[in-house]
Image (spheres, rainbow, N blue to C red):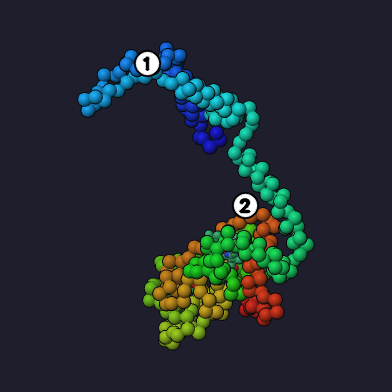
Amino acid sequence: MSDFVNGFWGYFISIIALGGVIWCIWLLYTQRRWLGTKPVAGQVEDTGHVWDGDLTELNNPVPRWWTWMYLLMCLFALGYLFFMPGLGEYKGQLGYSSTGEVAQQQARMAEAVRPIYARFETMDIPQISQDAGAREIGQRLFLNTCAQCHGSDAKGGPSFPNLADGDWLHGGSPEAIMQTITKGRVGIMPPWKGTIDPKTAGDIAQYVRSLSGLTADPVRVFRGKREFANFCVACHGVDGKGNQALGAPNLTDDVWLYGGSEATIVKTILDGRDNRMPAHEEILSPEQIKILTAWVWGLSNKPGAESVASNEAAK
Ligand code: HEC
Ligand code: HEC
């Protein structure tokens, strides 16, 4: 009953449950004079209601089996309420609880999968990322826990980063990825509405576009560059290559969390962005987080292929 804010509801439920049983027994008691009598045609009382001229409502005695059935049901209910939790704070003689059952099942489950994960205990992230069995588990975990935000192919979407492109907001090392999954991340870009007017924001957006080699108006780029140096370099760096410690994205790689059009960049500048990756330490076990880390890391670190962890070089 811990879900209730005070003791009242416990009593309320107990009274309704017991009251229902008592009422049922009382009703059967009031009908006892019929017990043992058999309805005899022509001698049965009627209620006085007649429909369609000849359809009379009879008042037959309650059948005996019916009375017994209800009596047994009342006994069953009382027995149930004695053994099982059902009356307010009373826990029942058997001490059963559904939370306890879930905990037991989870413990059994953890025990059953322990040997599966034990194999990966001594392996490091790159090794796990190449293990076929681990990749299969990782993929399933990802589809269950991460795909609703990052997409089933891990390629993300607006505001949800692509995890397969070797470009990282917070870092692509095994440690950084594990930290991201365990503790979550926030990416906050402050709004500049009060400080920067929309026209200037447009100029800055042109400069930001030019950093990624996108088409931009040279005159506005020139003006925007000056403003960028004023307002943006603290987080995105003098060269616009970002800062993983702050989660400030690299603005020079034509990889966009929100989009690279002038309108979208202006919106980012004026309204800011507040983006969160939820912590998973309470949802996933450390073993599962390790496998997921390896799976995500493996997306951009394919064995044999040229390493795409190019952020390392870009830093
Ligand atoms: C509720 C949505 C949501 C879920 C669920 C989610 N993420 Fe994220 N994740 C985000 C957002 C949003 C960000 C970007 C945070 C930011 O802007 O700094 C992010 C960022 C990340 C990053 C950092 C990417 C980078 O470029 O540094 C990694 C790695 C990541 N998520 C992995 C996962 C994994 C693995 C799971 C499943 C265990 C998962 N995420 C579940 C929303 C989610
Ligand atoms: C206090 C640090 C900070 C400052 C100052 C800052 N930004 Fe950001 N910016 C961020 C962070 C953090 C993000 C990532 C937000 C997220 O994860 O959703 C971001 C995201 C962006 C994006 C989105 C990139 C994409 O991939 O879609 C753009 C564009 C951007 N900033 C441009 C600017 C410009 C232009 C300025 C100067 C007017 C600026 N930022 C100032 C921290 C900052």
Q: Considering only vertical position in the picture, is 188 above or below 237?
A: above
Q: Nearer the viewer, residue 234 or 244?
A: 244
Q: Considering only vertical position in the picture, is 160 above or below 20?
A: below
Q: Residue furthest right?
A: 122
Kindly identify the amino acid type of the residue bearing the numbered disc 2: Glu
Q: Considering only vertical position in the picture, is 128 above or below 95?
A: below
Q: Considering only vertical position in the picture, is 289 above or below 132?
A: above
Q: Which image quadrant is residue 301 in?
A: bottom right
What residue sits 63% from the left and 40% below the top? Answer: 101
Name the residue beneath numbered marker 1: 40
Kindly identify the amino acid type of the residue bearing the numbered disc 1: Val
Q: Earlier in the sequence, mark 1 or mark 2?
A: 1
What residue sits 41% from the left and 16% below the top? Answer: 38
Q: Residue furthest front?
A: 41
Q: Quadrant of the N terminus?
A: top right
Mark 2 Cα shell of 10 Å, populated few (<14), some (14-19), many (≥20) = few
Name the residue beneath numbered marker 2: 282
Q: Residue furthest bottom?
A: 218
Q: Quadrant of the C terminus?
A: bottom right
Disc 2 is placed on an element classified as loop
Residue 129 position in % (x across, y down): 69, 68
